[in-house]
Amino acid sequence: MYINFFKRIIDFILAAIGFVFLSPFFFTVAIVLFFSNNGKIFFFQPRPGKNEKIFKVIKFKSMNDKKDENGELLPFHLRVTKFGNFIRKYSLDEIPQLLNVLKGEMSLVGPRPLLVQYLPLYNDFQKQRHVAKPGITGWAQVNGRNAISWEQKFELDVWYVKNRSFKTDVKILLLTVKKVFVKEGVNSSENLNMSTFTGTPTTN
């Protein structure tokens, strides 16, 4: 009952309350980015959601669009701006994802939405992470995030999918708040500190 009905209602209510509460930060960051990023405030990127349905995740734009001599975007660490680094440090770049939650594309808690190009690389076990809606935070995020391997991350994601409950979600949300305030793990940039997933080697 919680997974199929109440979780969505709770997500919507808490996301709406959170958006109102965080609106001063939202508009302050938006104004600064408008002037520092030549009018570009948001970053939209296709990500796979529940049942691998593609949606566009919304974040504050923390990187510029500088390219190399071949016209390719520079690496993440060379494009993140000073203000972008600040909003990443305090997870302020994640605030717009509350809009994804309100739209029903994401949940407050669930496996983090990863890159679309990873979809063909998942094995059958790892694909189970897409049984649930992706979340702003998740079990992997409060248990190491970028400090753990991809395989460990997927194991944590699938564990969450199989053990979803109101109690588990509350625990994850409380741990997330704690980690944000102590700047531990959960604030590490997904793009700056994560290696690229190239698939899990098969064993004979």
Image (spheres, helix red, strand yellow):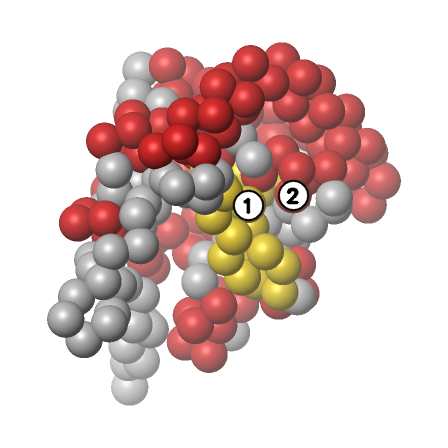
Tally of marks: 2
Mark 1, Cα crowd under 10 Å, few <14 / some 14-19 / many 20+, is some
Q: Secondary structure at mark 1?
A: strand
**Measured from the top left, where is residue 58 in percent x and y?**
55, 45
User: x and y percent of residue 2 in the render?
Assistant: 79, 36
From this view, report whether residue 82 is shown above or below residue 192.
Answer: above
- Tag 2: amino acid: Asn
**74 w.r.t. 142: above or below:** below
Distance Cα–Cα, label 1 vs label 2:
7 Å
Amino acid, disc 1:
Ile
At 41% across and 25% down in the image, what residue appears?
32
Residue at 72%, 24% (x, y): give it: 16
Q: As rendered, which of 29 and 54 lies closer to the eye?
A: 29
Circles 1, 2 touching at the beta carbon (< 8 Å): yes
Mark 2 surroundings within 10 Å by alpha-carbon count, few (fewer than 14), some (14 through 19), many (20 or more): many
In front of the other: 203 or 28:
28
Residue at the disc numbered 1: 58
Mark 1 or 2, nearer chain start: 1
Is residue 158 among what the camera can see? no
Q: Write the residue at 78% across / 38% down.
A: 8
- Above or below residue 71? Residue 60 is above
Residue 44 in the image, given as x and y percentages of width and height: 52, 52
Residue 202 position in % (x across, y down):
31, 80
